[in-house]
């Protein structure tokens, strides 16, 4: 690397790498994802990637962590006071996407690629650990919303942790079916969760 070449020290370089990883993952999938394919998606060399990450695995673990940070930046559910509206906002964010610059097609292309990354987790401790961290964070957030709704008299008396686990299993199952079956199920599941389940969760005396 010559003295004038960017070594990736700028504050925005890591974000650029993550966005390039997103684009390359959607385009090539996990199997076709290489450091060069990622470098091709931004205006710096492959050497910059290796300056920050030794391997594709290291970069993808960082990418999974970045997704959690991005989720927090784009889903400001804490700004919503009503627990029911907050829970619906969380479901929409998880199931339908939150990134303003992504089209619906890009959203599902991304989840198709992410499914390939998830498929490595049974054999890769680093992937499994980071995916578990992301999952636990969202599960805890859902449980906290449900618990607050119960305390404020908005929701029925249910087990917040167990209910959150069920909700995420439903959402994750819908995403899996959306990208692996010849069926458009995401919107139907969203309607069932919001119009049927959340409506049931609401205490009858609050209507």
Image (cartoon, rainbow, N blue to C red):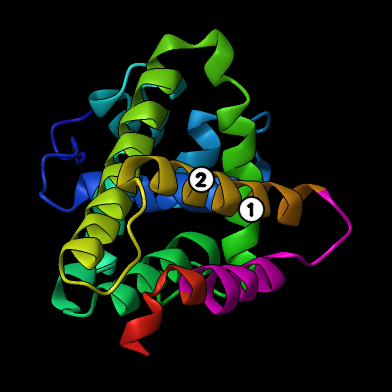
Q: Residue at 35% of width from left, 68% of height from top?
A: 87
x, y (%) of residue 202? Answer: 39, 74
Near mark 2 (Cα within 10 A), the count class, few <14, some 14-19 or many ≥20, is few
Residue farthest along the bottom direction in this orientation: 207
> Residue reaching furthest front?
205
Whether 193 is among the magenta residues is: yes
**What quarter of the picture does the C terminus occupy?**
bottom left
Q: From where the camera sits, is residue 26 visible?
A: no
Among numbered discs 2 and 1, the one appearing first in the sequence? 2
What is the spatial separation of the Cα atoms under label 2 and label 1, in whole angstroms?
14 Å
Q: Which mark, residue 166?
A: 2
Left or right: 186, with 14 as reference point: right
Residue drawn at (55%, 39%) of the image: 37
Instruction: Please provide percent x and percent y for residue 6.
Output: 19, 41
User: x, y (%) of residue 159?
Assistant: 34, 45
Q: Which of the numbered marks, if any, corresponds to residue 167? A: none
Image quarter of residue 193: bottom right
Judging from the image, what secondary structure is the residue with disc 1 in? helix
Quadrant (top left, top right, bottom left, bottom right) of the N terminus: top left
Q: Nearer the viewer, residue 144 or 135?
A: 144
Q: Are marks 2 and 1 in contact (CB under 8 Å)?
A: no
Q: Is residue 58 left or right of residue 119?
A: left
Q: Residue at position x 46%, y 59% from top?
A: 94
Region of the chain picked out in magenta, as a range: 181-198
Q: Is residue 93 visible?
A: yes
Q: Is residue 8 above or below residue 96?
A: above
Q: Is residue 59 left or right of residue 141?
A: right
Q: Is residue 74 left or right of residue 198?
A: left
Looking at this rendering, what residue extends furthest in the right direction?
182
In front here: 65 or 128?
Answer: 128
Residue of label 1:
175
């Amino acid at each position: 690397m010559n003295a004038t070449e960017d070594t990736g020290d700028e504050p925005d370089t890591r974000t650029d790498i993550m966005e390039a990883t997103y684009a390359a993952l959607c385009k090539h999938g996990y199997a076709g994802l290489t450091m060069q394919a990622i470098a091709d998606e931004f205006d710096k060399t492959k050497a910059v990637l290796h300056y920050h990450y030794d391997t594709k695995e290291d970069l993808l673990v960082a990418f999974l962590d970045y997704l959690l940070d991005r989720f927090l930046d784009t889903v400001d559910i804490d700004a919503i006071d009503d627990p029911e509206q907050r829970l619906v906002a969380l479901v929409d964010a998880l199931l339908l996407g939150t990134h303003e610059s992504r089209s619906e097609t890009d959203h599902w292309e991304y989840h198709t690629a992410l499914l390939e990354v998830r498929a490595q987790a049974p054999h890769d401790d680093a992937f499994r650990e980071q995916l578990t961290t992301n999952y636990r964070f969202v599960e805890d957030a859902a449980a906290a919303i449900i618990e607050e709704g119960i305390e404020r008299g908005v929701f029925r008396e249910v087990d917040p942790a167990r209910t959150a686990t069920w909700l995420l299993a439903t959402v994750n199952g819908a995403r899996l079916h959306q990208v692996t079956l010849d069926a458009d199920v995401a919107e139907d599941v969203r309607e069932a969760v919001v119009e049927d389940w959340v409506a049931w969760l609401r205490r009858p005396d609050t209507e």
